[in-house]
Amino acid sequence: MRPRLVFIVSFSWLLVSNAQLVDQHDEAYDKTCSAEGCVETKTEPNIVTRSLHECSAGHHPFQQCTISNVMLDKNKKTFLVHHSPEVEELHVSNTWNIISTDDPFTCDRVVKHGFVFLFYYYHGSSNYFHLHYDTLIPLYSLLRDHMINGHLNDDVLLMPSVETSRLKIIDWGTDAFSYKPDAQPIWMQMLSVFGPESAFLPLSTAVWGMENALWGSDQEKTICFDHLYLGVPHVDYSSRSFMSSYVEFVKEQLGLGNLPLPSTPKLGLISRSNRRRIVNEDQLIEVVSNAIESEIIDYSGLSFREQVKLTHNYTIIAGINGAGLTNCLFLPTGAVAMQLVPFNATNLNFKEFGELLKSRVHYLEWHCSDPDSSIMGRGVTFENADTIVSSDEFVGLLFQALVVGINKKLIE
């Protein structure tokens, strides 16, 4: 019996030691003295625990990691982990500065859950497709466990960031968040479905400590996190249940959860202004006008909420491959999305668009087969060429759309 007793005691000691390694904090007190005596006040602890990490395949970047006991040093533009040099070798360290230290952390603020993620931003603008595909949808997948009735928990801080270039270190000086409160850009309109601006701390020195800044405080030089989530996970874009959940979440947050369904079939044809335009869009609308109520859609200049609300008015939306087509996610249930693909556009992401839209609506795809229908200017590739869409083939596509889903029910 003695060996067995020794084994149990030893095992218990190991459990206690491990718990101390993970959970132990140094308690600190400030002493204030007066004529009446001295009072000790407990301050935020200096975290001395070893940082632990767990990683899996990510969407963007290619690794998604959760790290415990992390401190953001805003002055050094660095995330510090404690006594974990192996974390410096993680793929996410190529995007966000992560350095191991043996020094204890002194925290101006402590947050339970911090989420650090990227979004597409290039020369003062973003891309509506990539904002959904690379940021909002996988971020929603990650945040669902930290919401109650669609509202983010108070113990969460969201930290958007921008790459200097693809999969390179982030741009700590980005101007993506340097905007006036009444001029919120489209990317912040979209990110705001997750919470008010007070739930965010953009990783941008351009807005930290500014007078009347929306974020940050000169008094908060260091922020400590019990758990820091870096990057976003892989998601199954083909999952109907997941994508429907995402769409309903967005609509609810935008106050568009109970929009009435269209009473008759209606076609919208997306117009583009810079490249991959439909040259004969007016002709196409005229050709189908006797068969269905139809009009050209121009999403440019509309807010995120306005785009989602407008999209709900149609039972069919057609558009050439491009960001505006992403709005088809917000079509009524049973509606039809029609993607038009330019001639020989093998490098376009039409397959990703197809996978995304099939998860939400009935989906049709048309490929231009006539090279003479591509309008090629100097330096223009087939992928970005303007296209003359065959009116006969477009009508054939429309008739396919009218015999499925909500259109079939409305016609019957």
Image: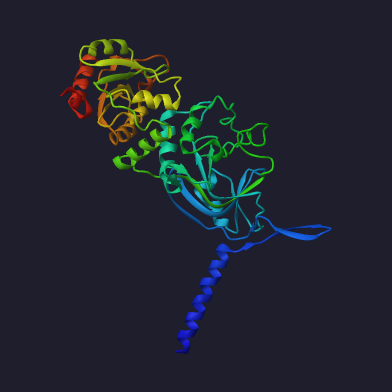
Using residue 395 as the reference point, say whether residue 119 is left or right of it. Answer: right
Residue 183 place in picture, x, y as percent:
55, 24
Using residue 403 as the reference point, say whether residue 87 is left or right of it. Answer: right
Taking the spot 58% from the left edge, 39% from the top edge, the residue there is: 203
Residue 172 place in picture, x, y as percent:
60, 37
Using residue 152 as the reference point, say whether residue 173 is left or right of it. Answer: right
* Nearer-the-camera pick, 218 or 324: 218
* Nearer-the-camera pick, 320 or 167: 320
Quadrant that contains the C terminus: top left
Taking the spot 60% from the left edge, 29% from the top edge, the residue there is: 178
* Nearer-the-camera pick, 261 or 353: 261
Q: Judge whether residue 389 can be spotted in this image.
A: no
Q: Quadrant of residue 104?
A: bottom right
- Residue found at the far bottom of this picture: 1
- Residue found at the far front of this picture: 36
Q: How is the image coloured?
A: rainbow
Residue 51 place in picture, x, y as percent:
56, 57
Quadrant that contains the N terminus: bottom left
User: Is residue 268 placed above or below 16 in the rendered structure?
Assistant: above
Count the marks: how many?
0
- Residue found at the far left of this picture: 412
User: Is residue 138 placed above or below 257 in the rendered structure?
Assistant: below
Q: Quadrant of residue 179?
A: top right
Using residue 88 as the reference point, say whether residue 59 is left or right of it. Answer: left
Taking the spot 56% from the left edge, 44% from the top edge, the residue there is: 96
User: Is residue 142 placed above or below 289 in the rendered structure?
Assistant: below
Residue 308 place in picture, x, y as percent:
38, 27
Taking the spot 28% from the left edge, 17% from the top edge, the residue there is: 371
Q: Judge whether residue 12 can be spotted in this image.
A: yes
